[in-house]
């Protein structure tokens, strides 16, 4: 999950092929990543949204959603509305994948 304004295609390419672990995070942390399929989901954020805060809030919201744990953090109402809509789309996507226990 990225928090920068880079084009999603470029960002995914760098994460999968970059030699620098800070750029090639997937390559550096996911065993046999070159043998796996990855899907990139991109969501546009307004320029006025603090990207690091949005990333943190979305990460927590997705953890809550998939682990059925109560919210640990309460973002602002604007951030919460944005994060909840993205989390719902991500969850729908995951549930549509073959092998999903819910889909």
Image: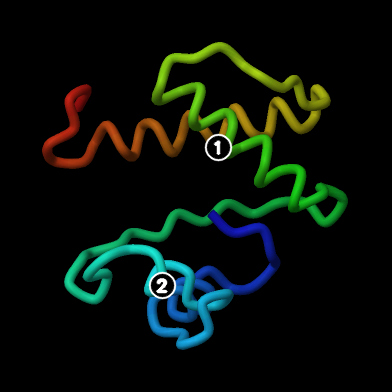
Q: Does residue 21 appear left or right of residue 101 in this picture?
A: right
Q: Does residue 93 appear left or right of residue 22 in this picture?
A: left
- What colouring style does the render use? rainbow
The residue shown at (53%, 68%) is 8
Between the C-alphas of marks 2 and 1, the distance is 26 Å
Q: Is residue 49 above or below residue 3?
A: above
The residue shown at (58%, 31%) is 85
Q: Which residue is mark 1?
A: 86
Answer whether labels 2 and 1 touch (C-beta < 8 Å). Answer: no
Q: Is residue 55 above or below residue 16?
A: above
Where is residue 89? Give x, y as percent. 45, 35
What SS does tag 1 mark?
helix
Where is residue 61? Give x, y as percent. 57, 28
Viewer-proximal residue among 95 and 17 = 17
The quarter of the picture where the C terminus appears is top left
Q: Does residue 44 appear left or right of residue 25 in this picture?
A: right
Q: Does residue 55 appear left or right of residue 103 in this picture?
A: right
Viewer-proximal residue among 20 and 6 = 20
Q: Nearer the viewer, mark 2 or mark 1?
A: 2
Where is residue 58? Give x, y as percent. 61, 37
> Label 2 crowding class (10 Å Cα cut-off): few <14, some 14-19, many 20+?
some
The residue shown at (30%, 62%) is 38
Viewer-proximal residue among 78 and 32 = 32
Is tag 2's residue or tag 1's residue first in the polypeptide sequence?
A: 2
**In the image, which disc is placed on residue 28?**
2
């Amino acid at each position: 999950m990225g928090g920068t304004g880079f084009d999603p295609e470029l960002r995914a390419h760098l994460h999968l092929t970059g030699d620098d672990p800070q750029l090639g995070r997937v390559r550096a942390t996911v065993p046999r990543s070159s043998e796996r399929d990855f899907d990139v989901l991109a969501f546009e954020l307004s320029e006025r949204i603090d990207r690091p805060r949005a990333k943190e809030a979305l990460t927590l919201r997705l953890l809550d959603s998939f682990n059925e744990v109560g919210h640990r953090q309460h973002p602002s109402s604007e951030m919460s509305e944005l994060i909840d809509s993205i989390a719902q789309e991500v969850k729908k996507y995951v549930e549509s994948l073959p092998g999903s226990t819910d889909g």
